[in-house]
Image (cartoon, rainbow, N blue to C red):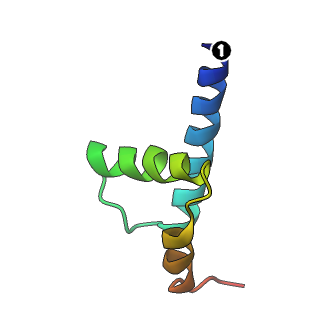
Amino acid sequence: MGFVYIIFVCIAAYGIVSRSLTMYNSIEFTAQNLSSAIFYRPYWFLYSVVDDEKDNLNGKEFIQ
């Protein structure tokens, strides 16, 4: 159970930081949107499913 807890904390931390950097002001503040953005996508990153994320980042403009 301890291992599952550590994985959960790591996924949550990565999800919060990555979504706040890439999707600032574009996610509606609802429980369903937040949970899918913070937990669902980063969970699939564990299995190397990142194609949709690459397409999402290609359309963003970053300040240098």
* Total labels drawn: 1
Q: Residues within 10 Å of mark 1 (few under 14, many from 20)?
A: few
Query: Which of these two is toward me, 46 or 17?
Result: 46
The secondary structure type at the circle numbered 1 is helix
Q: Is residue 8 left or right of residue 64?
A: left
Which residue does the image show at 55% across and 39% down from the upper left? Answer: 12
Query: Which of these two is toward me, 7 or 14?
Result: 7
Q: Is residue 40 left or right of residue 45?
A: left
In the image, residue 1 lies at what x, y percent? 60, 13
Which residue does the image show at 48% across and 54% down from the upper left? Answer: 41
In the image, residue 38 lies at what x, y percent? 47, 48
Query: Which of these two is toward me, 11 or 17?
Result: 11
Residue 34 vs 9, above or below: the answer is below
Residue 57 vs 30, above or below: the answer is below
Which residue does the image show at 53% across and 69% down from the upper left? Answer: 53
Q: List the single residue furthest toward the top.
A: 1
In the image, residue 2 lies at what x, y percent? 65, 15
Which quadrant does the C terminus fall into?
bottom right
- Which amino acid, mark 1? Gly
Which residue does the image show at 28% across and 46% down from the upper left? Answer: 32
Task: Name the residue tied to disc 1.
Answer: 2
Q: Is residue 50 left or right of residue 32?
A: right
Q: List the single residue furthest toward the right.
A: 64
